[in-house]
């Protein structure tokens, strides 16, 4: 904002508003377009004279003369504080005296933010309140919260301390195990800063363990190498992992090898059928998981038969996967085989029937035309022989 001279007669000094960051340096310039040896003067908001021409009037080591002439008076205020803010006056000592105002704005730099309210560690289902605080800003700073990279809304509180402000923003939430390892960042934005001030805290959450068992084979068969792994989540990590079978210890420690969370059976056989259980705990609780193992006989794939109507038995038989649920007994497999055999037999009967239907039969009937009207057997025979030439008309077909 500039104040300019009003024509050649009765001109006014020209000044400009200045904005400076607290602790910085402000240059205050007053000038006129022409001057007939008339002095210029700078005064502070308290109307104390700072410089009259090139003469310093106020004893303040922070205020220095930069340039003094008939057309310009520039002074420098270093290490500016909030108390220096206000309206400064440049006077041109004509008759009458002409004055122009210039406003010095001092920006208060916010302090670096601090986050309070963290409890390390927090427990799952606890309700905690995180508070971010910054002081000394002018005007009041803006606070933003981020959960990892996603912005979340906080509750803002503003308090004035003299000319500056203390700003607080709070987040309140119930802790979940998904908050474990989440970074909460408080960002302070202000016009005095080239980039925001940020501070981050990582939330640590303790929670009870949860276990699951994974397996290396979908259809375990005799003689195969088989591995179970007890996958656990929990904080602190649940230790140690204990393995058992059917409620007791592992029966064959030579073939059943435990390494940390893994149970390996080197060579499967039918005696390995049963329920395997892993269990682990931390100071917040204990968890377990179970897996029901059923070992199948070795399945040998039969090569396809050359006969088109006899498909490979291995390609028809259903596959019974190993699962955590109930496993059917061996007679279920026998029933499946019987069903397949019956199905193939029915297919053969149908095919054979269609084969016979395609081969038509031909014969002469005794009901040929004229034979039924013959008075005696000899005449019937003669009539039948005479009508033999019409045999093609007396065909009957198997359909």
Image: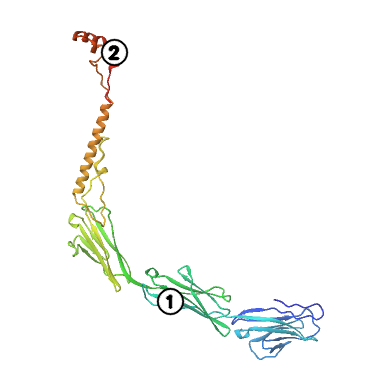
What label does residue 390 carry, if any?
A: 2
| 297 to 27, vertically: above or below | above
| Residue 280 makes an appearance in the image | yes
| 327 to 380, vertically: above or below | below
365 on left or right of 147: left
399 on left or right of 146: left
How far, Cα to Cα, is label 1 from label 2?
111 Å
Q: Position of residue 361 (x, y in %)?
A: 25, 21
| Cβ atoms under marks 1 and 2 closer than 8 Å | no
Q: Which of the two marks, 1 or 2, is nearer to us in this view?
A: 2
Dot 2 alpha-carbon crowd within 10 angstroms: few under 14, some 14 to 19, many 20 or more: some
294 on left or right of 197: left
Secondary structure category for the residue under label 2: helix
Q: Position of residue 94 (x, y in %)?
A: 79, 86
What label does residue 129 carry, if any?
A: 1
Give me the residue at 23% from left, 47% from top. 299
Residue lying furthest right in this view? Answer: 9
Give me the residue at 56% from left, 75% from top. 190
Position of the C terminus, as image quadrant, is top left
Give me the residue at 74% from left, 79% from top. 14
Q: Position of residue 164 (x, y in %)?
A: 56, 82
Quadrant in which residue 69 is drawn: bottom right
What label does residue 299 carry, if any?
A: none
Position of the N terminus, as image quadrant, is bottom right
């Amino acid at each position: 904002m500039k104040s300019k001279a009003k024509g050649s007669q009765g001109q006014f000094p020209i000044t400009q508003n200045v904005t400076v960051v607290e602790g910085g340096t402000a240059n205050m310039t007053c000038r006129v377009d022409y001057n007939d040896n008339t002095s210029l003067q700078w005064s502070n908001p308290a109307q104390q004279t700072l410089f009259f021409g090139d003469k310093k009037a106020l004893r303040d080591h922070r205020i220095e003369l930069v340039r003094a002439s008939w057309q310009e008076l520039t002074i420098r205020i270093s290490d500016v504080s909030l108390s220096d803010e206000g309206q400064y006056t440049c006077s041109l000592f004509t008759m009458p005296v002409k004055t122009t105002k210039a406003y010095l704005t001092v920006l208060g730099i916010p302090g670096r933010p601090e986050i309070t309210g963290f409890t390390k560690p927090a427990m799952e289902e606890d309700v905690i309140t995180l508070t971010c605080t910054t002081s000394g800003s002018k005007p009041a700073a803006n606070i933003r919260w981020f959960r990892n990279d996603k912005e979340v809304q906080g509750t803002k509180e503003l308090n004035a301390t003299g000319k500056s402000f203390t700003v607080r923003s709070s987040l309140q939430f119930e802790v979940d195990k998904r908050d474990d390892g989440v970074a909460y960042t408080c960002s302070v934005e202000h016009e005095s800063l080239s980039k925001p001030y940020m501070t981050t805290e990582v939330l640590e959450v303790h929670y009870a363990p949860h276990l699951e068992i994974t397996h290396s084979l979908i259809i375990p068969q005799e003689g195969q190498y088989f591995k179970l792994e007890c996958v656990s989540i929990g904080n602190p990590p649940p230790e140690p992992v204990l393995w058992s079978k059917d409620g007791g210890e592992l029966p064959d420690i030579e073939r059943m090898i435990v390494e940390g969370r893994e149970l390996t059976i080197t060579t499967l056989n039918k005696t390995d059928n049963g329920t395997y259980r892993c269990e682990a705990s931390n100071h917040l609780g204990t968890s377990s998981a179970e897996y029901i193992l059923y070992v199948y006989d070795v399945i040998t794939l039969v090569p396809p038969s050359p006969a088109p109507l006899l498909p490979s038995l291995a390609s028809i038989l259903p596959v019974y996967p190993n699962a955590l649920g109930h496993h059917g007994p061996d007679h279920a497999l026998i029933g499946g085989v019987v069903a397949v055999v019956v199905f193939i037999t029915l297919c053969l009967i149908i095919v054979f029937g269609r084969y016979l239907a395609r081969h038509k039969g031909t014969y002469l009937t005794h009901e040929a035309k004229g034979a039924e009207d013959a008075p005696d057997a000899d005449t019937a025979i003669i009539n039948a022989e005479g009508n033999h030439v019409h045999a093609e008309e007396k065909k009957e077909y198997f359909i």
